Image (cartoon, helix red, strand yellow):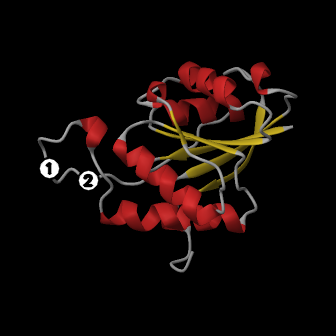
Amino acid sequence: MKTLLVLRHAKSSWKHRDTSDHDRPLNKRGKRDAPRMGRLVAAQGLCPDVIVSSTAKRARWTADEVAQHSGYAGAVQLERRLYLASPDEIVDVVRAVAGAARRVMVVGHNPGLEDLVARLAGRPETLPTAALAEIRLSIRAWKDLGTTSAGTLAGVWRPRELPDDA
């Protein structure tokens, strides 16, 4: 049994229109929600063994905040291929970085993340910014993961649905 945690980056800023999409930082809400999601990960007992993130600034900042507030002890791995990745590309990255991990978190972007969750869980799920989905997979090794692997959606958490003190 393996667990894939799918986390969409927190809310980003559009304040500086001349900033490239890849370099957009978190806005005030994103800076509030990313640590909240890290605390939620800790409270739910979901601290990952591996965190891999898109190289986009908003995703990196989200991953760093979640790592810091979840009790994650490793380094966040950055993977350029996760920037605006398709479900197939996301799966390729997970297979490449997961190793013997039991629980892997991917921090990235829509629509690829929503598409991946829909394929693995067998039903669509909306992932607004900073939303987290937990998918349990009946696979022995990450090399067996594919976009058609049947998983169970064990939980979805959205910042707006959490109590203010989360």
Q: Quadrant of the C terminus?
A: bottom right
- Residue 79, percent from left and from top: 49, 30
User: How many marks overall?
Assistant: 2
- Report which residue position mark 1 lands on: 16
- Report which residue position mark 2 lands on: 13
Say what amino acid the circle numbered 1 marks.
Answer: His
**Measuring 45% from the left and 64% from the top, which residue is drawn there?**
33
Which picture quadrant has residue 66? bottom right
- Residue 144, percent from left and from top: 79, 20
| In the image: residue 33, left or right of residue 158 | left
Q: Quadrant of the N terminus?
A: top right
Residue at the limit of the structure toward the bottom, as seen here: 165
92 shown above or below 113:
above
**Measuring 70% from the left and 68% from the top, which residue is drawn there?**
43
Dot 2: element:
loop
Which of these two is toward me, 63 or 11?
63
Say what amino acid the circle numbered 2 marks.
Answer: Ser
| In the image: residue 164, left or right of residue 39 | left
Which picture quadrant has residue 119? top right
Q: Given contact means CB atoms under 8 Å apart, are the residues at marks 1 and 2 in contact? A: yes
Dot 1: element:
loop
Residue 3 visible to the viewer: yes
Label 2 crowd bin: few (<14), some (14–19), many (20+), radius 10 Å = some
**Measuring 41% from the left and 36% from the top, which residue is drawn there?**
55
- Residue 52, percent from left and from top: 57, 39
